[in-house]
Image (cartoon, rainbow, N blue to C red):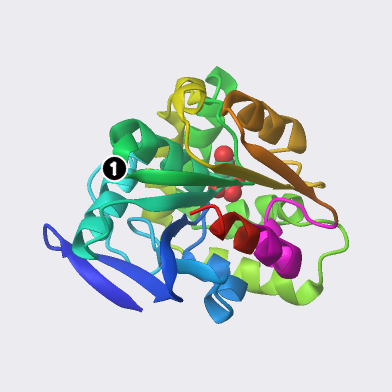
Amino acid sequence: MKTISLKGRAYAYEERGEGTPLLLLHGFPFSSESFWPQLEAPPKGFRLIAPDHRGFGQSGLGEGPATMEAMAEDALALLDALKEPSAVIGGVSMGGYVALALARLDPGRVRGLLLIDTQSFADDEAGKARREAVAQDVLQNGVAGLTAGMLPKLLAKTAPAAISARVEAMMLRQDPKAVAAAARGMALRSDAKDILARFANPTLVIVGAEDVITPPEKAQVMAQLVTGARLEVVPGAGHLVNLEQPAAFGGLVEAFATRF
Ligand code: MLT
């Protein structure tokens, strides 16, 4: 794992493969480790760059709520440090929210979008209240309760126990302060429909057929907003399609690489 310093704060990332830069942004409450099959066998045609969002994995935490914009600014600073003027921006779930925030902040740097098990909608009032409850719970009691509550919803029923165990261990390792900051940051995100409606570069939307957190209907909304976007619904996968069906996922990503 490598790190850069962002105003004295460590920002860690993994880097593999060669080709068009693909910035791959992880979901909540994970780290870049949640791309383990892709880090082991990077999709052909892409230079994979997978950072840890602020406070997660080996990255240092910033001040206040970790908004999607703040995480997007970190990711843009990494592209600067790597001397990549633009990249395909991909993200799983919360990573997708960050990808869309990045496209709002600096659309000229987005060569394409890879939206994985994510959505364009903002939280409603009830959703925002749930985020705040999560933040308070993890700060008081640690991440075990959140992990136990989320884990059964993350994966398809047929997912191997080994995947579930590794995801659980990864979640349990995350810093409660980072988890609370990201939960509060997600509550502050805006609807991203406008970003997608004006986005004109290649876009691939991938969703697990059994994703109950950001289900295929939400993926379809995103794909319909971008002219020429492709939607792929992968059977036998829930909310973490890149872990649950890495071969199918890798094939779709490699086919997408040929568009750049
Ligand atoms: C994620 O996987 O990043 C989260 O489930 C996203 C969310 O809670 O909206």
Q: Magenta residues, as a range?
A: 236-252
In the rendered image, which quarter is residue 255 located in? Answer: bottom right
Quadrant location, ligand no. 1: top right
* Left or right: 169 in relation to 91: right
Foreground residue among 17 and 260: 260
Q: Is residue 137 visible?
A: no
Based on the picture, tell me whether residue 243 belongs to the magenta stretch: yes
Q: Is residue 148 visible?
A: yes
Residue type indicated by callout 1: Ala
Counting from the top left corner in percent of width and height, residue 13 is at 35, 69
* Left or right: 170 in relation to 165: left
In the rendered image, which quarter is residue 70 located in? Answer: top left
Using the image, determine if residue 87 lies above or below residue 182. below
Using the image, determine if residue 99 lies above or below residue 161. above
Using the image, determine if residue 134 lies above or below residue 26. above
Foreground residue among 255 and 24: 255
For label 1, the crowd category at 10 Å Cα-Cα, with few meaning under 14, some 14 to 19 and many 20 or more, is: some
Counting from the top left corner in percent of width and height, residue 115 is at 57, 44
The residue shown at (60%, 41%) is 118
* Left or right: 87 in relation to 163: left
